[in-house]
Image (cartoon, helix red, strand yellow):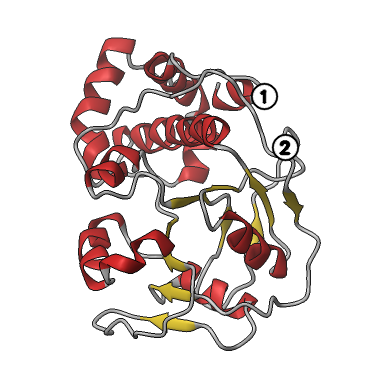
Amino acid sequence: MHRTLLPTPAQFTSLWGRTAPALFCTHPQNQLSARSRQDRRTSRAFMGKKADAPAQAITIIGGGRIGQALVDMGPGSDVLLKRGSSFPKDAPSPIIVCTRNDALEGVIESVPKDRHGDLVFIQNGMLQPWLEGQGLASATQLLVYFAVAKAGDTPVDGKTDVNPEGLTSVWGPHSEAVAQRLAAGGLACKVLDRPAFLQAMLEKLVWISAFMLVGVTHGGCSVGEVEKVHSQQVGVGRRVLLPSAAGVSWGGGGGRRAM
């Protein structure tokens, strides 16, 4: 009978240290001290009932699966900027950045400085230390829990039995506009305050990190295969990584989801 050997906590931590910066972050620093230990969620939630397309046009940088999906949810007057496009002076706000992490520096350079406050970042990973270094500590951030299989497909909301209301969350000055755009596509989105968003960000980082690292140890297998075949190793990884977020309250089911 085949027996799966589980990595020890020390082995998992070592692999995490070697791999995480390349997989999940544009900056080698991968930690953030939460400024509050309270889990205070705002009362605004868009629960995924499909709304009429909002009248507000937005600017979308990146024409991949997510960028195109956001355009398809809109009123038809959005500005979509692809690779090499120049930034128009009259670009509407907010400006949602739908590029890979390694393209972010170029994106910021392409956007006039007086428009940096309109930027919305949707990338995975602990972006906050890098954003602070760019003078964008208060920029709007979106945690995406929906999937688009290929460009043009309808997004699938990442609702689960544990969280049937959905997990996609947003924080920052353009939170309402972002949530309304997702609602136009039938996607749920919670508008959170900063402490609650930091918890959600760390929770997703732990989840992604555990799945990706286990996948790496098994030849780069898919997330689905990791969940089906190697879920015990994922549990080990989560338990190893959770202490790195020790300064954050794990109320509201966060600890259960991360475990």
**Could you tell me residue 132's position as x and y percent?**
28, 42
**Could you tell me residue 26's position as x and y percent?**
24, 47
The one of 123 and 151 positioned closer to us in this rendering: 123
Where the C terminus falls, by quadrant? top right
The residue depicted at 37 percent of the width and 38 percent of the height is 212
The one of 220 and 110 positioned closer to us in this rendering: 110
Quadrant housing residue 27? top left
Assign a secondary structure to mark 1: loop
Q: Mark 2 packing: few (<14 Cα in 10 Å), some, or many (20+)? A: few
Residue 3 visible from this viewpoint? no
- In the rendering, which numbered label is found on residue 163? 2
Name which residue type carries label 1: Gly
**Could you tell me residue 249's position as x and y percent?**
55, 18
- In the rendering, which numbered label is found on residue 102? none
The one of 182 and 159 positioned closer to us in this rendering: 182
Above-or-below relation of 157 to 4: below
Mark 1 and mark 2 in contact? Answer it, CB < 8 Å. Answer: yes
Q: Residue furthest front?
A: 114
The span from disc 1 to disc 2 (Cα, nearest Å) is 9 Å
The residue depicted at 58 percent of the width and 20 percent of the height is 38
Dot 1 or dot 2, earlier in sequence: 2
The residue depicted at 41 percent of the width and 85 percent of the height is 90
**Residue 124 placement, left or right of 93:** left
Residue 219 visible from this viewpoint? yes
**Could you tell me residue 123's position as x and y percent?**
40, 52
Name which residue type carries label 2: Asn
Quadrant housing residue 70? bottom right
The one of 247 and 206 positioned closer to us in this rendering: 247
- In the rendering, which numbered label is found on residue 253? 1
Quadrant housing residue 73? bottom right
Assign a secondary structure to mark 2: loop
